[in-house]
Amino acid sequence: MNLAQRLAEHVHSLGYADLDEDTVHAAKQRVVDSLGCALGGMDSPPARSIRAFALTLPEGPSTIFFEKRKVATDVAAFLNATMVRFLDYNDGYFSLEPGHPSDSIAACVAVAEAEGLGGEDLILAIVIAYEVQMRFQDAACLFRRGWDHVNFVTIAATMAVGKLLALTPPQLVHALGMALNGHIAMRQVRSGELSGWKGASAANATRNAVFCAYLARHGMTGPSDIFEGEMGFFAQVSGTFDFDVGKLGTRASRDFLIKQAKTKLYPTNGEMQTAVMAALALRPMLASLDAVESIRVDTTDVGFKFLAKDKAKWRPTTRETADHSLPYTVARAFLDGTITRASYDPSRLADPEVLRLIDKITVHEDPVLAANMPSLANRVTVMLKTGEVLSEEFGTKENPRTGLADAAIETKFRDFAEDRFSAERVKRTLDLCWTLDRQADLQALVASLALD
């Protein structure tokens, strides 16, 4: 069998009973975290644009997050996933390829609601999405060849929603062939000045997955040998790589990678998290930023190429560019003593203080740090006008795949939710998430999210 067939057979064979308790709990954590991130992104320009379009369409079976309106399932998946992704605060996984496995959660919710399925079905689909995407991230690197990581989201989301639709293994193969062949994403979405599509690219991958899974359910067939074919994924996109389906989580192994997804501490690009930590550790050592002669940031080749190489990263004019700008983010951390979602407000991008500090920053590619990938290490060194040198490095020794405890994830959710919902509503929504495996359907959960 080819890779698509082996993958489909595995996904088809997996059942909720195969999931261990820790895996189920990790899926609930991911739902809480993603819904909080979606609240943070609900009023973003991309979400407003997509919502305005969605509301021109006829009613459908899947709810728009935070509204009572239902639209077509693929449109709901697209809009809701864009909200989750906008702040760049949803969880991440860093391996040969970086990515955000939570990008598929909104599509799983949309399809499960449309199909009248319950919490166990949703949890299983989410676990499948994480497992498939993270194993592909372990197997191959796309960004070095100019392709975007959301191509792995396409694969993962297709398998997850196909499972929700009870597709047969041949139907799963056809869905994957259609979704992957017709929707290859370029890395240009994260190069130069970034646009609203940066936060919608993964959402679009899940929209395509939903559309193709439904087509396969109704008999549409897809290209054969989508990975190994003469002009398939290996030949055209990724290069040949080994993907051992036997490593995918099972009841026997209990090795489901969703337990290794990392919850972000700051609403910014994943490769910059440790640079923020280093800047914040140095800040209390400075009597004043006026005492700073220069700031040097040493980073990986990935950090340099995608967060500092482009001219646009040194004078960001959009939020999307700023939260992928190493110099802006480091400068903002030194100035404010934190990074929050307000750090990237458009009104703050041209702040004269931040621009003056950016002009004191240089960014350098460090092959030693790069060799520690996927730790995503960064070193920040401050040269004072007195000649004193201060330096902090984070990420070399820390485990980049550690999640947060329930209380911290709830705090992150409440930070977004308490401006929108009553305390009683916040508690009810959290209770529904933590008892998701006991929910016969998703109606109570989606209703709890609707703003009055």
Image (cartoon, rainbow, N blue to C red):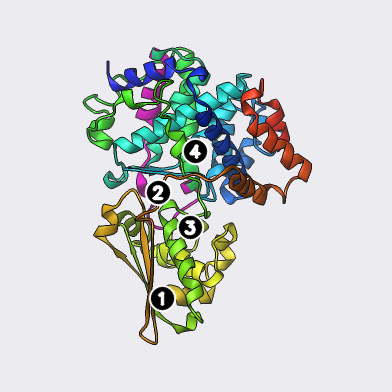
Which residue is identified by label 1?
Answer: 359
Secondary structure at badge 2 equals loop
Secondary structure at badge 4 equals helix
Which residue is identified by label 4?
Answer: 103
Can you tell which mark lies on residue 399?
2
* Comes first in the chain, label 3 or label 2: 3
Q: Position of residue 171 (x, y in %)?
A: 42, 15
Residue 180 counted in the magenta span: yes
**Residue under the point 72% across and 49% down:** 418
Whole-angstrom CA distance, mark 3 to mark 2, is 23 Å
Can you tell which mark lies on residue 27?
none
Which residue is identified by label 3?
Answer: 323
Quarter of the view holding residue 80: top right
Between label 3 and label 2, give the one nearer the viewer: 2
Residue 16 counted in the magenta span: no
- Find the magenta span and give its range: 170-198
Q: Position of residue 320 (x, y in %)?
A: 49, 55
Disc 4 crowd, CA 10 A, few/some/many (<14, 14-19, 20+):
many
Q: Nearer the viewer, residue 122 or 28?
A: 28
Quick check: 94 left or right of 411? left
Quarter occupied by the N terminus: top left
